[in-house]
Image: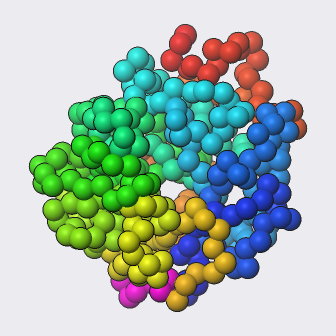
Amino acid sequence: MTSPHQLLWTGFRGLDSAEVDLPFRPGGIILFARNLDPDPGHGPARCRALVDGLQTRFGSDLPLAVALDQEGGPVSRLRPWTGSTPPLRLLWTRGGAAACEAWGRLWGEGLRLLGFNVDFAPVLDLWDGHPDAGIGDRAASALPAEAAAAAGAFLHGLESMGVRGCLKHFPGLGGTTLDSHQGLPALADADQVDRNAAAFVPLAHPDRLVMVAHLRTPASGPLPASLHRASVVDNPWGIQGRFLPDDLEMGGCADWSWDDRTRLSLEAGISGCWSARPRRAGPPALKPPDDSRRPSAPRLWPPRGPCGGTCRRRYPSTRRLGTVGSRGFRRPQGESDGWAHPHRR
């Protein structure tokens, strides 16, 4: 039987495993900048030691899901070690699928060396140019087919390295004007919602991690899509996946109590909940309802090893990232600083 705590993916405090104070075994852990030593010489090895220590502590029966947000561009937890990197839109417009796949492969190689097995990327939202919506150039294209091609290429590269990706932010934040970190964005145009969701269709399947947005739509009524069953497992587009809500500490769901957020998200068909803020325990509401369509929590991520075969398209292979050790990231032999731009040949 799944423990309620195993339905919770949680952030934590500390840079070393001995500092981490979690009184329960979570379903997954999520690292943020606060968990990473910014020193590029020692930080990567310290990160790997942290992850290995938490795997030893919590992953004895089943490998623990260890996740972070590493898209590149403005959302890059590894920026202190890698420097600035291009967002998905720049990769797509200048280098097409090959550049997107190359970056997915680079991040996958680096994340695997650091011990991560889940990356909350890529973004499948449609680009709309709105400066205040929190997406911007994280999105590749305004066209659903192009957004899917860019994200699919990135995903193929990432998962070919054994790191599972996560499509976000379903059903799509394109056309919104409010950052869901700050409040609850809304889309009143059902056609826009359908257009956004179309980008997810080519890539989603029952074993794919899909992050659901805190977004009010005509179908979700007063609730965010992340807490609304007809927007998750009963969505009208027939999109299947292993659904996770966006961070339940965000402003987009702040009008509901923590117990209501967890209860409603699980009733919506969410496979697990996550919180950036360290949680001392899963609340009583965090109990799986009787729903045979929800995958059990321990199967939310694959065993160690390549999982790129789950991507429906194949893209050309590219070079590898290099290695990580006590002195930090090492570029492939003979590479200059241009290693950070694999679409430049």
Residue at point 44%, 24% (across, down): 91
Q: Position of residue 53 (x, y in %)?
A: 81, 61
Dividing the picture into quadrants, the one containing residue 222 is: bottom left
Predominant secondary structure in magenta? Answer: loop
Q: Looking at this view, is 121 or 332 the one in front?
A: 121
Q: Where is residue 50 in the image (x, y as percent from the top left)?
A: 79, 56
Colour scheme shown: rainbow
Name the quadrant of the N terminus.
bottom right
Magenta stretch, residue numbers: 285-292
Residue 150 in view here: no
Q: Is residue 71 above or below residue 54?
A: above
Can residue 43 be found in the magenta stretch? no
Name the quadrant of the C terminus.
top right
Residue at point 68%, 15% (across, down): 337
Residue at point 78%, 27% (across, down): 330
Query: Left of 261 or right of it: where is 9?
Result: right
Residue at point 26%, 61% (across, down): 216
Query: Left of 237 or right of it: where is 30?
Result: right
Query: Left of 166 or right of it: where is 60?
Result: right
Residue 342 in view here: yes
Q: Position of residue 281 (x, y in %)?
A: 63, 81
Q: In this view, does 227 lie above or below 247?
A: below
Q: Looking at this view, is 27 or 215 the one in front?
A: 215
